[in-house]
Image (cartoon, rainbow, N blue to C red):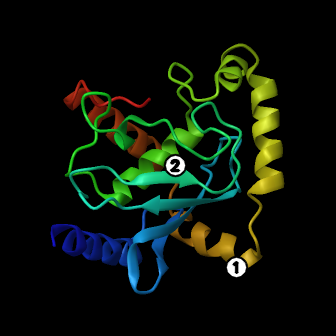
Amino acid sequence: MQKGVRLKRELEVLALRPPPGISCSPKEEDIIDVLDAKMIGLKGSPYEGGVFKLEIKIPDKYPFEPPHVQFKTPVYHPNVDVSGRICLDLLKLPSKGSWRPTISLAGLLVSVQLLLATPNPDDPLMADIAEEYRYNKPEYERKAKEWTKKYAAPENSNESKTLEATSSNEDSDTTKKRKSDASEEDTKDPKHKRT
């Protein structure tokens, strides 16, 4: 009961006021516990201009258990493996993670978008990419851009424009504020860290 009510409310918010550069909706009209999401890579990152598809599966115990989020678009990234699994603390229950029932789908998707732009090489799923990120960043960025161009190019100009319309008002100050807000959350809760 709680899952359905909460999920419907969150999907309404995502439809009316999506986070900049992010969209999310049910995969099928009558089934709301499998969602399709898209996000554009943030400006200034090697993923800029890419449209990345994700699948979100909502567990029966949501919001007391985190959703299962997986990239469907191949991503060259230390914290995303070849099957699209994501290493992010918010996607795990305590004590190994920092999921809390107060975290919204919108907030979770913003965190994934920020992780895409700012990898965490200290807790990688792909150790070789993490090493490259640490010790040969130009090569990492070259490969990440190459993969973005190859796998995350918008399917058509409308797809990119629709997502960009939600982020066109977002300038670097807004991006800094989003990163600052995420950092502030980390400070409030010492268990809250990206992995």
Name the secondary structure under disc 1. Answer: helix
Residue 179 position in % (x across, y down):
42, 39
Q: Which residue is mark 2?
A: 113
Residue at 55 percent of width and 44 percent of height: 85
Contact flag, marks 1 and 2 (Cβ < 8 Å) = no
Compared to 115, does 106 lie above or below? below
Left or right placement of residue 5 versus residue 12 in this view: left
Residue 149 position in % (x across, y down):
81, 52
Residue farthest front in this picture: 60
Residue at 68 percent of width and 50 percent of height: 48
Q: Nearer the viewer, residue 26 or 191?
A: 26
Residue 116 visible (yes or no): yes
Left or right placement of residue 124 versus residue 191 in this view: right
Q: Residue flagged by tag 1: what amino acid is it?
A: Asn
How dense is the environment of label 2, judged by Cα within 10 Å: few (below 14), some, or many (20 and up)?
some
Q: Residue flagged by tag 2: what amino acid is it?
A: Gln
Q: Distance between the Cα atoms at labels 1 and 2?
A: 21 Å
For the C terminus, the image quarter is top left
